[in-house]
Amino acid sequence: MHTESDNHINDKINTEQIKMLHDAIPSLLLVNVLVGLALAYGFWDVVSHQSILICLALLLVMVITRGAFFLSYKKYFKPSNKKLYRHSLIIGSACAGIIWGLIGVLFLPTGEQNYQLFILLALMAMTGGSAFTLAIYLPCYFAYVPVTLLPIIIQLFILGEKFHIALAVATSAFFLVLTSFNIRVNKNFKTSLTLRFENLDLIEQLKQQKDEAERANRAKSKFLAAASHDLRQPLYSLGLFTSVLDELIQFPKVKKVVEQINSSVSALTNLFDKLLDISQLDAGVIEVKKQDFCLKIIFDKLQDSFDSQAREKNITINWPAKYPAVHSEPDLLEQIIRNYLTNAIKYTLKGEITIECEVDDSEVNKGMVSIHVSDSGIGISEVNLADIYEEFYQISNPERDREKGLGLGLSIVKRTAMLLEHDIAVSSEVDKGSRFSIFVDQSQLVVDTLGFTTKEDNHDIADNSGLIVVIDDEKGIREGLDSILQIWGYSVIVACDLDDALLQLKSSNRYPDIIISDYRLKEGKTGIDAIKAIHSAYNRNIPALIITGDIASDRLVEMSSSNFQVLFKPVPPMKLRAFLRSARV
């Protein structure tokens, strides 16, 4: 029973056979003309001139007619006329067979065995040579070859002499062998075409599935971008107002409630930051600037962060005694190792965590530094190892308890390692622990530059007199920023759009010292547009900050190329204050 797919492939095979046979027509017609003229010349003194001229005339008519059909096919080919093209090929082959069958009878002189052999060999050569082409489509083969050979075979049998009977039998055997061979050729040809079209169909299906997957991925990214922006707006407002309360409230009980609110805000902020990390990696806006540095730069910061966490769980962290130099991007490499350590502490209930930094001298990883984070935690089964790098995948958190993490850390590790072109590996055994590794290029150069950081006191309110312009179409964010900036001692102008900002600036008769703008403003305008307009209005390169909740790939690329500093909502007050201080206002 033929399926729709089988019929579709058979239809394609039939179309391909027609095309290939038509492409062979010019060479077939040329051979007909040349062989016909050669026979006419060779048999001119043996066969009657009338018979030769009649055969040549028929041959010429056939060649002209088939040539005209061929030119029409090349110029006006339509798949819907496939039946007409198929019939024209069969009829054309039959006409050629009839003419050559007639030539075989008329050019067979009695008593001239040399000429009899000559015409017989000529016909066998014509059928044998063209049969390989006609084997593409068997109806054309059977319309031409039998019609060409049978008349001369019958004529040889009629002559009745042993010589002629032997020639007739030999020619019959040639015909049968040729037919059997061409049937196999046709079968193999159709099989190869079937496989070819099945493969093309599979490629097309894979392409469609790939396109569907890409559309689904784009839809997911679009949804995440929209959801992130819309949720970050009220979250940012909430964070600003709780920061104001934290600055002003002195009552312990109320302050404890504020701290609990801040804890919830921090948890949501952590989720959005992870989503942002993934979006930035997918968008390709993270610029990798590899350099030579000593791993101690990274591990000094990690030790400060994780020793206290480990002590709270009675876990011991064994830090390396020596740190080699590597060639990588310090911040991104730190992010990978930080995720490894976060997971190690999360899934280790007792025991220890060991970090190793080793120069690898093996042939496989020669010239590499292997960084391993090993723990004595719950371990991972071999079945789950392949899934741990997927987003939101967690081995032992079916209830989605946020205190156990989000399931995004290792997904970020995988993307970041690909960006850095570093190999990563994991080995694990259930109830015995896991070992996560990353392999980094070794460097002979140690850069003696340390990035020192200082902790800020949130209650250290500076005496500032600079004017800050805040542009945001969200009322809650404008009011929150206005409150916290005034507490910090700044003069503030808050505006819902560029026109409002310029109008208030004109009324104040002051130029702004800093511009803080949301990226997405009213009427399709952006913070980049607003900042550039204020720069142009005052002819000054005023320090500017874009605050956004957008994680859409195209917007991330645009913001990255603007060369303005960008912070993503919700912006912790400490980061905002750090920017203001760096702007020297």
Image: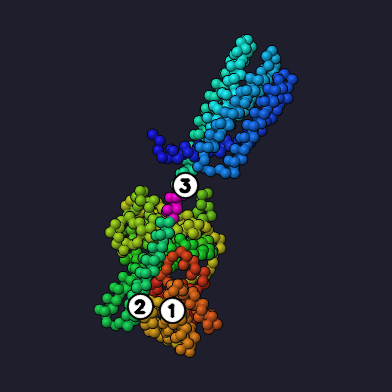
- Pointer 1: what residue? 497
Classify mark 2: residues with Cα within 10 Å, few (<14), some (14-19) or many (20+).
some
At x 36%, y 48%, the residue is: 382
Q: Quadrant of residue 337?
A: bottom left
- Pointer 2: what residue? 476
Instruction: Check if residue 207 falls in the magenta segment.
Output: yes
The main secondary structure of the magenta stretch is helix
Amino acid tagged 2: Gly
Q: First in sequence, mark 2 or 1: give its number.
A: 2
At x 61%, y 40%, the residue is: 71
Q: Quadrant of residue 110?
A: top right
Give the number of the disc on residue 204.
3
Q: Position of residue 288 (x, y in %)?
A: 51, 63
Is there CB contact under 8 Å for labels 2 and 1?
no
Is there CB contact under 8 Å for labels 3 and 2?
no
Q: Name the element at disc 3.
A: helix
Q: Position of residue 180 (x, y in %)?
A: 53, 24
Q: Say if 57 sits above or below 366 in the image.
A: above
Q: Name the element at disc 1.
A: loop
At x 45%, y 72%, the residue is: 524
Q: Say if 232 sits above or below 60 in the image.
A: below
